[in-house]
């Protein structure tokens, strides 16, 4: 608190709010606030991770069976995309601190491009699931025809059995010649097998998959919006000269969004 | 505060009344709705919370009236289900959760820190706006046919009922963010805005309580958020995670729900304990006893509070081992709670106790909260809980803690800081009459419920055996007396706003910083930089006259 009052207008730093004494106090406060917000975000997702753990512990067969329908290539690609976006974001924070506005604008744009690419790839995956009827809860109606039709498309969304090369026509998706999985540890029936080999209540996996990746996707969209807001302010000549708090904080948020995906990817795509 | 305040500042502050204050700084509705001033936001919260309290109270009176006779008295069974659900949802989400932190806390927290505002004023305003939006959703649910699941929204019924579950849960979801923003703001403010000389262990205990509360708000509320989101997704999209018809697990909902909603009762009670620590010390004219123990016990309650949710599910079929662990941990919460009560009693011991209206509420709090807390142990014990589960005993228990604890302390705090809020005094005589009516009415309403609960009257039932009629009727009469008490209070507080005597800067002789500025405070809170001393060293102030109140004792002067 400065001893003289009427304060707000007299500060030299236009970014310093009237109730703070120093820019450092203000920046620290904003940053602490952001960290606490990230803690709430973590707790927000923790409910879903708990749901995942509870169902995985109680019904491992659902997870083992469903795993085949998630495309590891696209998931891996998305992981790489997000890691790159983290790099550009971290670099952007540095650029803001150094007051390099041009570089900052470029890096923020790059981060947004990566984020949009992530959503694009996610969209392809969702689209495939949609076509196969591999949806959540009561909308889980796997249908063979759609699967077959989809097989003709280049996007490798079919189960690993068919994913090596793009099948020319539906007949290339192997029929249930593999037979029922029986006691095999990792039944990998083709899609046309769904009705026969699927364990009970397999829709729970897709519920969890969609709600977790969906909520993460919403966070990516929110990230694109706030990065866009940063970009606008950057082009308006803000940031630099020791003021980079918003870039810092959005950076923290973006890294959290990344890190949640880093956990989602192995839990949903890789572990069987 | 040793010699921090310049001599005569108290008198100057008293003169400042009617001059610049946060109330007169700007004019017009917009200057309120879009203000960033923590004091105005606190007052708007206060108005909103009291309005919600009125609404929830009307629902409660309707429920009690319906229970006057077995079978139908005034409303149908379906309406009755909606009434008790709305009473619960409104009282929990719109009243108890925000009650003390968002209204009183918002107003006094920066003042107690000698600061100009909370650290993040825009977030503070956003919190209030979200509160209003959430409240609108809840009201919309009432207008679109109400909701009949009970405030707990247990699945699978909440998935299948035809009532407005989505609107209600969406409202609660939004209110959750409002609560998170308040908590986040308080943590940052307490960490970053303390004045010179105020270490953590020289903070007023109210701030320790608000800090502990904020930690729970920040860490528990998001889990409710995701739970309600899943419930909404359940109803709109049919994701089935909580729906046994789709392979989901309804008990998982209960775990999620209580992981928030049990800590939430500590969101409600901890700030009440903070107010209690202030009131007991000031009105006993004695330094608080066991400062560090009270401070640590707030943190202990916040920590233990996260580990006991399973005691709501003793009869749900969870494992016996889990039951035993949850029961043990539940008992452990009694320790820090008792530490606080013993310290308050020790503070009063050989104190010079002043029975002003706020102190009456403080004393009522100790009495009622002790009953509420001890009956909690009955319910935390496995064997007795099986008998008492879902009976009126539980209803009485949580009303003794939530009403007898939180609301009573809220009223105590309201009467204590009222002169600071509005610069006016209220009628002490009517204040005491209302306090008495509320105390008697409350005990008549809820003590009878302990009795009928232990005799097996189940909660939430529309109909009951004739043998319970006398209890229900006594309880209903009690609720009317309670309502009368609140009408008296509304009367004299309204009178105070218009015609109340001007209040001095420090009418009670407290040593915390908020009393060192004028009543009501100026827009920027303080006219000089504040330095904190011992917040409970009451010898730093001396009484002058009722009109001037207490002023800082100047160096070397004796009374």
Image: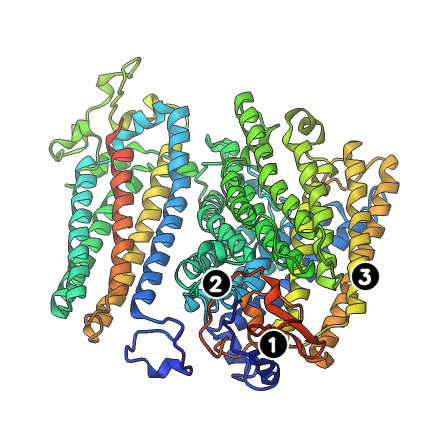
| B353 or B458, nearer to the observer | B353
Single out the mark in the foreground, 1 or 2.
1
Question: Decide: marks 1, 2 in contact (CB < 8 A)?
Answer: no
Chain letter of mark 1 equals B
- SS class of the residue under badge 2? helix
Q: Residue B332 placed where, x, y %?
A: 57, 34
Which residue is label 3 attached to?
B484
Which residue, as the protein is rendered here, is positioned at the far bottom? Answer: B19
| Quadrant hosting residue B119 | bottom left
Which residue is label 1 attached to?
B519
| B327 or B423, nearer to the observer | B423
Q: CA distance from mark 3 to mark 1?
A: 30 Å
* Same subunit, tags 2 and 3: yes
Relative horizontal placement of residue B547, taking residue B272 as reference (left or right): right
| B3 or B489, nearer to the observer | B3
| Quadrant hosting residue B29 | bottom right
Q: Residue B111 placed where, x, y %?
A: 52, 68
Which residue is located at x 65 percent, y 77 percent? B504
**Disc on the earlier residue, 3 or 1:** 3
Q: Residue A61 placed where, x, y %?
A: 35, 23
Tell me the tag on residue B127.
2
Chain letter of mark 2 equals B
């Amino acid at each position: 608190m400065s001893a003289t009052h009427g304060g707000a207008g007299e500060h030299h730093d236009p970014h310093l709010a009237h109730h703070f004494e120093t820019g450092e106090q203000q920046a620290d406060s904003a940053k602490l606030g952001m960290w606490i917000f990230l803690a709430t975000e973590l707790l927000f997702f923790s409910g879903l991770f708990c749901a995942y753990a509870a169902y995985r512990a109680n019904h491992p067969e659902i997870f083992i069976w469903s795993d085949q329908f998630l495309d590891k290539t696209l998931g891996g690609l998305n992981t790489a995309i997000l890691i790159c976006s983290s790099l550009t974001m971290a670099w952007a924070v540095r650029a803001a601190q150094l007051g390099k506005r041009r570089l900052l604008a470029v890096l923020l744009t790059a981060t947004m491009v990566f984020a949009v690419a992530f959503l694009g790839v996610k969209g392809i995956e969702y689209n495939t699931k949609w076509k196969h009827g591999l949806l959540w809860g009561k909308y889980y109606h796997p249908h063979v025809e759609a699967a077959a039709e989809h097989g003709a498309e280049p996007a490798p969304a079919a189960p690993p059995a068919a994913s090596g090369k793009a099948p020319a026509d539906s007949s290339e998706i192997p029929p249930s010649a593999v037979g029922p999985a029986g006691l095999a540890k990792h039944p990998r029936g083709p899609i046309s097998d769904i009705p026969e080999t699927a364990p009970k209540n397999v829709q729970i996996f897709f519920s969890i998959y969609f709600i977790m990746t969906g909520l993460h996707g919403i966070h990516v969209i929110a990230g694109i919006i706030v990065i866009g807001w940063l970009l606008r302010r950057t082009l308006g000549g803000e940031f630099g000269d020791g003021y980079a708090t918003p870039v810092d904080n959005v950076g923290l948020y973006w890294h959290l969004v990344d890190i949640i995906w880093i956990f989602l990817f192995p839990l949903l795509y890789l572990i069987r | 505060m040793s010699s921090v305040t310049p001599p005569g500042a108290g008198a100057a502050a008293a003169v400042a009344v009617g001059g610049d204050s946060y109330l007169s700084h700007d004019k017009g509705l917009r200057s309120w709705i879009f203000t960033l001033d923590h004091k105005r936001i606190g007052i708007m919260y206060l108005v909103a919370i009291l309005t919600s309290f009125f609404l929830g109270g009307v629902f409660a009176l309707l429920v009690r009236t319906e229970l006057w006779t077995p079978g139908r008295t005034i409303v149908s069974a379906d309406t009755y289900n909606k009434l008790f659900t709305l009473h619960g949802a409104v009282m929990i989400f719109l009243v108890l959760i925000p009650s003390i932190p968002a209204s009183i806390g918002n107003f006094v927290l920066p003042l107690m820190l000698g600061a100009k505002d909370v650290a993040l004023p825009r977030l503070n305003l956003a919190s209030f706006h979200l509160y209003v939006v959430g409240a609108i959703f809840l009201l919309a649910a009432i207008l679109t046919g109400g909701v009949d699941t009970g405030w707990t929204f247990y699945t699978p019924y909440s998935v299948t009922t035809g009532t407005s579950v989505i609107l209600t849960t969406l409202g609660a979801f939004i209110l959750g963010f409002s609560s998170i923003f308040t908590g986040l703001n308080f943590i940052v403010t307490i960490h970053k805005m303390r004045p010179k000389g105020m270490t953590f262990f020289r903070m007023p205990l109210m701030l320790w309580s608000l800090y502990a509360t904020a930690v729970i708000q920040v860490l528990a509320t998001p889990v409710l958020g995701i739970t309600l989101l899943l419930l909404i997704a359940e109803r709109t999209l049919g994701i089935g995670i909580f729906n046994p018809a789709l392979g989901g697990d309804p008990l998982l909902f209960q775990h999620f729900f209580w992981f928030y909603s049990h800590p939430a009762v500590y969101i409600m009670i901890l700030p009440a304990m903070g107010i209690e620590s202030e009131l007991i010390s000031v009105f006993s004219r004695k330094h608080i006893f066991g400062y560090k123990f009270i401070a640590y016990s707030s943190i202990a309650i916040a920590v233990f509070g996260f580990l006991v949710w399973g005691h709501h599910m003793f009869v749900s079929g969870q494992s016996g081992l889990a039951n035993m662990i949850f029961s043990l941990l539940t008992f452990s919460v009694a320790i820090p709670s008792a530490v606080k009560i013993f310290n308050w009693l020790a503070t009063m011991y050989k104190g010079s106790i002043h029975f002003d209206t706020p102190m009456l509420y403080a004393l009522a709090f100790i009495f009622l909260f002790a009953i509420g807390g001890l009956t909690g142990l009955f319910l935390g014990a496995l064997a007795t809980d099986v008998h008492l589960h879902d009976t009126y005993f539980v209803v009485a228990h949580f009303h003794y803690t939530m009403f007898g604890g939180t609301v009573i302390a809220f009223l105590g705090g309201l009467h204590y800081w009222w002169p600071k809020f509005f610069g006016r005094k209220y009628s002490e005589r009517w204040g005491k009459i209302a306090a008495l009516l509320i105390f008697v009415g409350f005990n008549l309403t809820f003590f009878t419920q302990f009795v009928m609960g232990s005799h097996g009257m189940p909660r939430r039932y529309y109909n009951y055996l004739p043998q319970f009629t006398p209890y229900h009727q006594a309880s209903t009469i009690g609720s009317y007396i309670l309502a009368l008490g609140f009408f008296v209070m509304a009367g004299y507080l309204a009178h105070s706003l218009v015609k109340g005597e001007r209040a001095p800067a420090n009418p009670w002789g407290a040593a915390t910083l908020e009393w060192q500025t004028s009543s009501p405070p100026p827009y920027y809170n303080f006219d000089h930089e504040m330095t904190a001393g011992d917040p409970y060293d009451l010898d730093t102030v001396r009484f002058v006259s009722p009109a001037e109140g207490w002023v800082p004792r100047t160096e070397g002067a004796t009374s």
